[in-house]
Image (cartoon, rainbow, N blue to C red):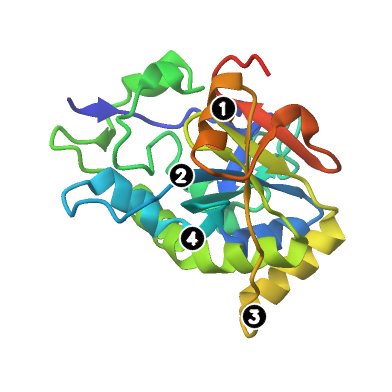
């Protein structure tokens, strides 16, 4: 199906968001005085997937190897620019104050970066008239018609893969070793801005390969915690998180 779209500058996508950003974008966001958080999730990874499991290989590309107890895992760390209300860069006339250097996620919206997600207009914040445009966002063959959108999608995917090892070093520097279970929830880490920026700069500079240690998989469901324990993982109930860590569940919890 051909999807038509044109931005109406309603500003809805510039309010109260968690915006996925790259390592370079996170450093710029922090230097501008913004807030960034780390969303951590782990995927059990006892062995490499078959070559035709394209979704698994997509996840592998954007994650790093770790262990939780006896279980090999892959950890996906997403850097999120967060703000309540209007984006700090949104001007009174609904224009972007950093338009030329805005994050790739802003350039992509409302398109999808994940090739396994279909664009669903009902889940987007854009008003109905935005979808009545003569401009084509996605053609019938599934390709993104706008060159800037298509380029930003490729850029986000490439940055995800390129940044995976940097994020591993970042977590080691910050002492972050807890994550949610993929598809169930994430552990959100919110380090102080100055410390976060210094750690990002050190991780991006490369050099020493830091070993973070063993990861704990956090859950808010008793059945999941029992399963993790039986698999020999290092697990933790979400209620035991402390400090700047918190849990965001995607399904109802009971623990």
Q: Secondary structure at mark 3?
A: helix
Q: Look at the numbered discs 3 and 1 and tell me whether their residues touch, using CB distance below 8 Å.
A: no
Q: Quadrant of residue 202?
A: bottom right
Assign the C terminus to one quadrant of the image. top right
Q: Is residue 148 visible?
A: no
Residue in front for this viewpoint, 97 or 36: 36
Q: Please tell me which of labels 2 and 4 falls first in the chain.
A: 2
Q: Secondary structure at mark 1?
A: helix
Residue in front for this viewpoint, 149 or 7: 149
In x, y percent, where is residue 200? 70, 67
* Residue assigned mark 2: 43
- Name the residue: 76% across, 31% down: 84
Instruction: Describe residue 126's horizontal placement relative to residue 209 as left or right.
Output: left
* Residue assigned mark 4: 64
Q: Please tell me which of labels 3 and 1 falls first in the chain.
A: 3
Rendered position, 83 above or below 79: above
Determine the CA span between mark 3 and mark 1. 40 Å
- Name the residue: 14% across, 32% down: 140
Q: Please tell me which of labels 4 and 1 falls first in the chain.
A: 4
């Amino acid at each position: 199906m051909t999807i038509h779209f044109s931005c109406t500058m309603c500003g809805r996508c510039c309010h109260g968001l968690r915006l996925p950003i790259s390592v370079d974008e996170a450093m710029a966001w922090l230097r501008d005085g913004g807030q960034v958080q780390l969303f951590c999730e782990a995927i059990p990874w006892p062995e490499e997937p078959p070559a035709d499991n394209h979704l698994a290989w997509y996840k592998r590309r954007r994650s790093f190897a770790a262990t939780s107890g006896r279980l090999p895992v892959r950890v996906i760390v997403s850097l999120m620019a967060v703000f309540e209300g209007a984006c700090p860069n949104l001007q009174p006339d609904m224009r972007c104050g950093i338009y030329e250097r805005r994050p790739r996620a802003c350039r992509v919206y409302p398109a999808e970066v994940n090739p396994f997600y279909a664009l669903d207009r009902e889940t987007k914040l854009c008003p109905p008239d935005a979808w009545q445009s003569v401009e084509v966002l996605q053609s019938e063959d599934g390709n993104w018609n706008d060159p800037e959108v298509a380029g930003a999608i490729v850029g986000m995917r490439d940055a995800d893969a390129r940044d995976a090892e940097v994020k591993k070093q970042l977590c080691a520097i910050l002492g972050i070793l807890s994550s949610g279970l993929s598809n169930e929830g994430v552990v959100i880490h919110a380090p102080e801005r100055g410390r976060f920026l210094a750690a990002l700069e050190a991780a991006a500079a490369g050099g020493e390969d830091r070993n973070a240690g063993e990861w704990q998989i956090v859950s808010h469901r008793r059945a999941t915690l029992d399963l993790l324990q039986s698999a020999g993982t290092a697990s933790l109930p979400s209620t035991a998180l402390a400090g700047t860590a918190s849990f965001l569940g995607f399904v109802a919890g009971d623990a």
